[in-house]
Amino acid sequence: MRTGIATVCLSGTLKEKMQACAIAGFDGIEIFEPDLVTSPLPPEDVRKMAADLGLTLDLYQPFRDFDSVSGDLLTANLRRAEAKFKLMARLGMDTILVCSNVATASIDSDDLRAEQLGQLAALAGDHGVKVAYEALAWGKYVSDYEHAHKLVEAVDHPNLGTCLDSFHILSRNWDTAPIEAFSPDKIFFVQVADAPKLSMDVLSWSRHYRVFPGEGQFDLAKFMGHVVRAGYSGPVSLEIFNDVFRQSDVERTAVDAMRSLIWLEEQSAKWLDAASDAGTGTGAAGTPAPGRRRYPMELATLPQVAEPAGYNFAEVRAADTQGLETVLGQLGFEFNGRHRTKDVQLWSMGHARVIINEAAPADGDGATGDASPAIAALGFDVASPVIAAARAQQLKAPAVPRKSQANEEVFQGFAAPDSTEIFLCQGTSDGTAAWTSEFGEGLENPTAGPTAVIDHVNLAQPWQHFDEAVLFYTSALALEPQPFAEVPSPTGLVRSQVMATGDRAVRLVLNLAPLNQQRKTYQEHIAFAVDDLVATARDCRARGLEFLQIPANYYEDLDARFGLAPDFLATLQELNLLYDRDADGEFLHFYTATVGSVFFEMVERCGAYDGYGAPNAPVRHAVQYDHLQHR
Ligand SMILES: O=C(O)c1ccc(O)c(O)c1
Ligand SMILES: [Mg+2]
């Protein structure tokens, strides 16, 4: 698959954008006209720079408001087009995107449109230019890609074809199957964009909320499957208008973009395989099984991984470990000793393992950038750490070296977008971990919570890396994004995105947290699941644990909502427990006070309850905020 990206996706000057695209590994780019117009570089220099960087210049865009106009305007539009065709010759470009008229269309006639597009195609032919006509979802008369393609067919000129843009098609819920019937010679260009499903006018949605494939909710694998089956083999190019990407670090965004295409390529091949297995297609892409037909567009595959089987460990880093040690002990964790060569401690409760890393973080490392306790790493049980690491590497995840001595288990690791280190561990069927023997005297039999596990981990995401993180965990770790929620807090709405495995053995919650202005830290937490939360809470209290104090108003509201038995309600209040219930079951949980930027949660899931006590989250945020104010 030939990869491309429009310069409008990125921040910086045209030169910076082009360099970042080359570094990220793109084959080619679309030049967004304002990027050229505002550039000090003469077109000839842009052409040379692209050649030097190994980038093809695939599409000049956009040419607006051409069709459906009166005669005077048509003359002016053809003159404007010819100027652009001449410019493209200097750039060494041969394809221009013409989008359906939004602003100046005044005559709604397909015959007239075909006539005018025919004149444009003839002029383009004289200049050796191909015109790719794209239906904007908000085009005045042409807003449907099939309509645009009918016009292209009616004109029937070798210099006029269709540009398919997944956003304009999927935002309007148009069926993508008819693409398969398009002649591949008439598909001149393909743009891909994902988006969250929002209800707003489609222009605002398109101009501000597009995201890279895998970061939104469109079925892009199906869209691409139909494109591939049509026989298209040109560039698949990202065109993402997004307010955040346009102001983020250009090289980093370009890598995020590239990852999205690598992932989409794989997903498209999988869609084709599944569709052909289901008998709805004629073959598969990528490396086809014997006898299966190849398509003109070859789709590369990635090392295949199943979703992780569970958390192997969570690692918290702190220069001063005292506070952490105290809380873990009070929660019922056992200290299992120090590592024989590294400055780390192991604490465990049942199968929940927490490593305390005594190495102070490098300046600017981690979510906090300071030496107070912070979640530094997560270990996941995977079937094959090597295969999973190879996949992550091919998805451009930065590898993190982990020093180890002979006879020690080597973890393959890579850095998540928020710089949390992700380690791939060899899982065992009984939930134990071989590496624990590298600590102290080895594991004593835990007395507390023998069945405890890590239930979920909640990581605060810097706002500019949130979408990137969703794609990262989706593509590299095979977690599935769940519908996101928004939780009110005193410092703003907290966007909360659960990433989980199908069996919920791994639940990772990404919070787009407003930065606390006073303490300049994000709060993150690790939650442990136990069988009997009330008994656990009593034990923790007996050991002196400082609970997050829940206001009495909360319990009054709880009673109003659920009509709980008075004894039970009194127990909840006495122990600062939070409660939730839905059609699937019940949820009890409590939080500890915060140490550095980390706190802990204990949960009990009853029945098939699958949530996180979301209705209680605003209470937690408000109490934690209050605490910080008065600390
Ligand atoms: O928002 C726009 O105007 C616009 C322009 C060109 C495109 O290819 C597109 O998809 C949208
Ligand atoms: Mg487009």
Image (cartoon, rainbow, N blue to C red):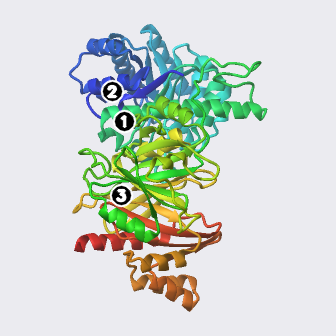
Q: Secondary structure at mark 3?
A: loop
Please, what is the three-letter code of the amino acid marked with disc 2? Ala
Given residues 302 and 366, the one toward you in this image is 366
- Residue at horizontal 57 percent and vertical 52 percent from the top: 432
Q: Is residue 608 left or right of residue 121?
A: right
Q: Which residue is mark 2?
A: 20
Kindly indicate whether the residue at mark 2 contacts the one at mark 1 (C-beta within 8 angstroms): yes
Quadrant of residue 243 in the image?
A: top left
Please, what is the three-letter code of the amino acid marked with disc 3? Ala
Quadrant of residue 530 in the image?
A: bottom right
Task: Check mark 2 vs ligand 1: CB closer than 8 Å? yes or no.
Answer: no
Q: Secondary structure at mark 1?
A: helix
Residue 162 lies, with reference to residue 121, above or below; the image says: below
- First reached walking from the N terminus: tag 1 or tag 2: 2
Kindly indicate whether the residue at mark 3 contacts the one at mark 1 (C-beta within 8 angstroms): no
Q: Which residue is mark 3?
A: 513
Q: Is residue 276 visible?
A: yes
Q: Which mark is residue 253?
A: 1
